[in-house]
């Protein structure tokens, strides 16, 4: 039986990942911030350990005690928008803390002789405003946001420890969405607000940059890529993306379309409060390596993702759950 240690268990990706690992027969341990323990929804079969990623001694002790076969690092300040307001904590959690985890993984491997695999959730934000399209594993790392810079540090550390002999993998994940996405991200903000507009409890949708183009995939597919990368015999980095970009405006149109509203333009307003200091024009990834080496491919396209998110919000609204 494989044993996994997962950080960020109560986030979108963490929740999908631990469910997937339990189904696959893993023994699953999670790291959860003490402040999040009471609100966390327990997943049967997952042992959650309270601890802060910034407490490197606690993290090292846990990894020594658990002796995991695979470590998945999904914790982080995952919002680019928030990273502008809080660059230091973003650097500490999404960047420097990767060092505690990966060093502990390496030490356990050295002390016990067993192979410890380290899987890092990296981000397309490491490429900044890329000069080539689509991007792949050879694209220059040149972040333009504090979040991207923190993630770039983590990505480089993975490569450093891989050179040192650790089975370490960095997955360069493009945006990936689901009904579990928090509304601080544009997709869920759109589907929730469109639901309220459709049901008459909101009048308008207020957004920032409508022209940004992103490669939006389905979050459970991205978790599937992590498990496949850990099971592969060679550690290497992978771009995980659908290869298709859509604008924020396209997402808005598709969400309104899903509730039968065609004349949506007058219901959308741009407010500079939601426009970022810098924002990549377009991110779109080439996942050929993951397709070839891991047999990975996305299962859901853009329209289906939007439709599922809208449907979940409509159902929640209509069954008296707050949306
Ligand atoms: P992230 O940038 O990967 O954290 O993902 P987001 O979902 O937060 O943002 C995706 C894109 O949507 C970015 O280009 C944002 O600038 C753009 N965007 C436009 N309006 C909004 C908004 O109101 N909220 C957020 N979060 N993003 C917005």
Image (cartoon, rainbow, N blue to C red):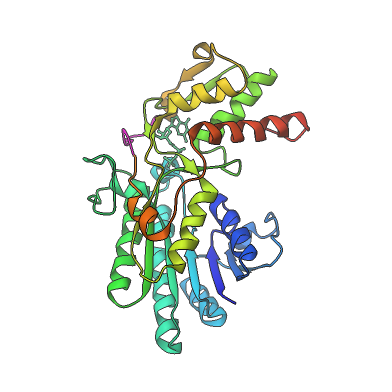
Q: Quadrant of residue 262?
A: top right
| Residue sitting farthest toward the right | 319
The image quadrant where one finds the C terminus is top right
Quick check: 191 above or below 185? above
As rendered, which of 56 and 299 lies closer to the eye?
299
Residue 81: x and y in percent read: 43, 40
Residue visible at 52% across and 79% down? 61
Please state if 323 lies on the left or on the right of 299 as rendered: right
Quick check: 269 above or below 237? above
Q: Within the displayed image, which quadrant is ligand 1 positioned in? A: top left
Give the overall secondary structure of the magenta segment. loop
- Image mark count: 0
Residue 228: x and y in percent read: 47, 62
Quick check: 132 above or below 234? above
- The reply to whether the magenta stretch includes residue 280 is yes
Q: Decide if residue 245 is in sight here.
A: yes
Please state if 262 lies on the left or on the right of 91 as rendered: right
Q: Decide if residue 201 is in sight here.
A: no
Q: Quadrant of residue 202?
A: top right
Residue visible at 59% across and 15% down? 261
Residue 224: x and y in percent read: 51, 56
The image quadrant where one finds the N terminus is bottom right
- The reply to whether the magenta stretch includes residue 11 is no
Residue visible at 69% across and 54% down? 39
Please state if 222 lies on the left or on the right of 178 as rendered: left
Q: Quadrant of residue 216?
A: top left
As rendered, which of 17 and 205 lies closer to the eye?
17
Residue 127: x and y in percent read: 29, 47
Q: Which residues are magenta?
A: 275-283
Residue visible at 56% across and 21% down? 256
């Amino acid at each position: 039986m494989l044993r996994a240690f997962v950080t960020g268990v109560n986030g979108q990706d963490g929740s999908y990942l631990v469910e997937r690992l339990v189904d696959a027969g893993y023994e699953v341990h999670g790291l959860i911030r003490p402040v999040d323990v009471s609100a966390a929804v327990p997943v049967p079969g997952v042992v959650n350990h309270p601890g802060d990623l910034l407490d490197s001694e606690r993290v090292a002790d846990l990894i020594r005690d658990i002796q995991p076969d695979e470590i998945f690092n999904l914790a982080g300040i995952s919002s680019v928008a928030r990273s502008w307001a809080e660059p230091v904590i973003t650097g500490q959690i999404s960047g420097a803390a990767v060092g505690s985890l990966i060093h502990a993984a390496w030490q356990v491997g050295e002390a016990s002789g067993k192979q410890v695999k380290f899987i890092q959730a990296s981000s397309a934000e490491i490429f900044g405003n890329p000069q080539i399209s689509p991007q792949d594993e050879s694209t220059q790392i040149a972040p333009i946001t504090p979040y991207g810079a923190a993630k770039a540090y983590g990505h480089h550390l993975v490569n450093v420890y891989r050179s040192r002999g650790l089975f370490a993998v960095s997955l360069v994940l493009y945006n990936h969405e689901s009904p579990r996405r928090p509304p601080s991200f544009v997709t869920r903000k759109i589907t929730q607000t469109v639901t309220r507009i459709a049901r008459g409890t909101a009048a308008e949708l207020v957004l920032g940059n409508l022209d940004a183009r992103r490669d939006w995939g389905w979050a459970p597919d991205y978790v599937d890529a992590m498990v496949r990368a850990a099971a592969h015999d060679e550690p290497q980095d992978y771009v995980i993306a659908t290869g298709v970009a859509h604008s924020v405006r396209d997402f808005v149109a598709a969400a309104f379309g899903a509730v039968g509203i065609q004349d949506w333009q007058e219901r959308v307003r741009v407010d500079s409060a939601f426009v970022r200091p810098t924002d990549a024009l377009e991110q779109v990834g080439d996942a050929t390596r993951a397709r070839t080496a891991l047999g990975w491919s996305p299962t859901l396209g853009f329209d289906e993702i939007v439709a599922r998110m809208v449907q979940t919000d409509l159902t929640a609204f209509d069954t008296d759950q707050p949306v």
